[in-house]
Amino acid sequence: MIKLKVIKKALICIFCINFISLGMDGQTNKPNILFIAVDDLKPIIGAYGNRMIKTPNIDRLAKRGTVFMNNYCQQAVCGPTRASLLTGMRPDMTKIWDLKTQLRDVSPNIITLPQYLITQGYSTQGIGKVFDPRNVDKNIDNVSWSVPYYKIDKKYYAPECGEPAAGIYQKKETKDAVEKIIQECLAKGMTRAEANAEAALKVKPSTECVDVPDNAYNDGANIMQSKDILKKLSTSGQPFFFAVGIAKPHLPFVAPKKYWDLYKRSEMPLASFQEQNSNPIPTAYHSASELRAYTDIPTEIDKTPQKKFGLTISMEKQQELIHGYYAAISYTDALVGELLNTLDSLGLSKNTIIVLWGDHGWHLGDHNLWCKHSNFEQATHAPLIISAPGITPNKTSSISEHVDIFPTLCDLAGVEVPKHLQGKSLKPVMKNQNITVKKYAVSQYPRSGVDEESGRLGYAPANVMGYSIRNSQYRFTIWMKNSFISTRPYDKNDELGVELYDYKADPLETKNVAKEKNYIPVAKQLKSDMLKYFKSQFIEK
């Protein structure tokens, strides 16, 4: 049972640390931390066994670190999962379940990882998408950073290309179409911001393949700037926590042509199961509203007979999207390589912890779903690789979660792990791949109603919440109505439905076996685990 008073006391203690007592000698002995956040990256990189994807640089990092093969996010959408990861607290404690709520409005006293590390003598700096900017202040949570959060510096763009249209596109026809709409809107008296927003709605292709340099796009320009920031940090005499956010492979799938050329579209692997599972819980599904918002998708919908769930698109468009996703991953991989090479060239690698994570997974047509926004395996399974000085590289099948990253980095850095964190340090697992620190991971996802959700996109209020336990073999999900969250008492009358999947027998989640006779004991045990989890989250007021 979590008591608010205990948490508040823990937070006060953290900020009562005497900065002077840290001392310069203590600072310089601490390892640096390079914190790489990747948007919408599912674990299909080479280190996770994919033989088609080209990710030599992330694989290089994996060979000197620990690969967490069974790592899971807390909520499969950008804002909530990042708020949870960066605070070490689950969504029901951060109170961030959507893409609009401001973290400091609902949890003003919460402590973020970089904010805490400042009290431990670290310089904390960041660039790119680390927090979701929609859930924090315009300074990307000002109290988390030692210096103002870096904005993209236009001088790092490829001069022959100029700035990308809408911050995204470089194809000439797309840039011309965007500019035309902007000028029309300005002529009507709209502000520049209103004109940009209108253009972003009307010109929004889901893919782009153009022969341009890496820094024609925001991510490439940010990485060039990051290299210069690392050079300055290397001479500061202070340990650093440097967070670098890479936006790809998030939609739209844009990447320089050379990364598209690594793959043949005809060889792109289509999801083998694109149906609803047996005994479905309708609210477990969504209509892929995020992808539907791209302006080339409506024609696909019109020409393709639609199923009653998900989003049905032609095989050709599926292969184009998957091709784009793979290309964007390889582009991201090259940018990660630039960061690793910079660390090596500056002589920082031997004293730097490197953590690379994807904020959640991504559906590529499985269950007829695209994007994330679910409690299924393809949305919740997320990559995590941590390299730390003095720890032998390995792979582990131990269950881990994003909430474990905060305490793990503290433990690896040799600083006190705050007592209030809801995750566990994974350092023991990194030192011995055969042990485990937890039985299961917990994910959750909100829904607006009881039927298949359409159009919520993380903004509409939710009155249904699905909680999902994933252990080494099974996933048990319980859907709760009446605006239930885990910090209030469980009521059986709030139950909407349950799901159970056996990944040894059914890795594609084709059967919900929650009510099958042979699985009743398993379902009973996992429900007991879920109720114990609910009880552990309940807040005594």
Image: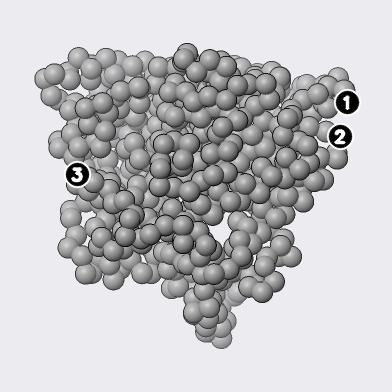
**N-terminal-most mark, 3 or 2:** 2
Mark 3 = which residue?
276
Tell me the distance, in whole angstroms, between the alpha carbons under discs 3 and 1. 59 Å
Say which element carries label 2: loop
Q: Which tag, 3 or 1, sits closer to the chain's start?
A: 1
Rendered location of residue 283, percent (x, y):
25, 42
Q: Secondary structure at mark 1?
A: helix
Please indicate whether residue 164 sits to the left or right of residue 299 in the image.
Answer: right
Three-letter code for the amino acid on which mark 2 is drawn: Gly
Real-space Cα separation, disc 2 to disc 1, in angstroms: 8 Å
Residue lying at 60% horizontally and 30% vertically, measured from the top left: 64
- Say which mark, if any, is on residue 237: 2
Amino acid type assigned to the residue bearing label 1 in the image = Met
Q: Which is closer to the viewer, label 3 or label 2?
A: 2
Residue bearing mark 1: 24
Q: Nearer the viewer, residue 517 or 495?
A: 517
Number of labels in the image equals 3
Residue at screen point 58% across, 38% down: 60
Please, which colouring scheme is shown?
A: one colour
Contact? badges 2 and 1 (CB < 8 Å): yes
The residues bearing labels 3 and 2 have C-alpha atoms spaced at a distance of 56 Å
Q: Amino acid at mark 3?
A: Gln
Query: Which label sits in the foreground, 2 or 1?
Result: 2
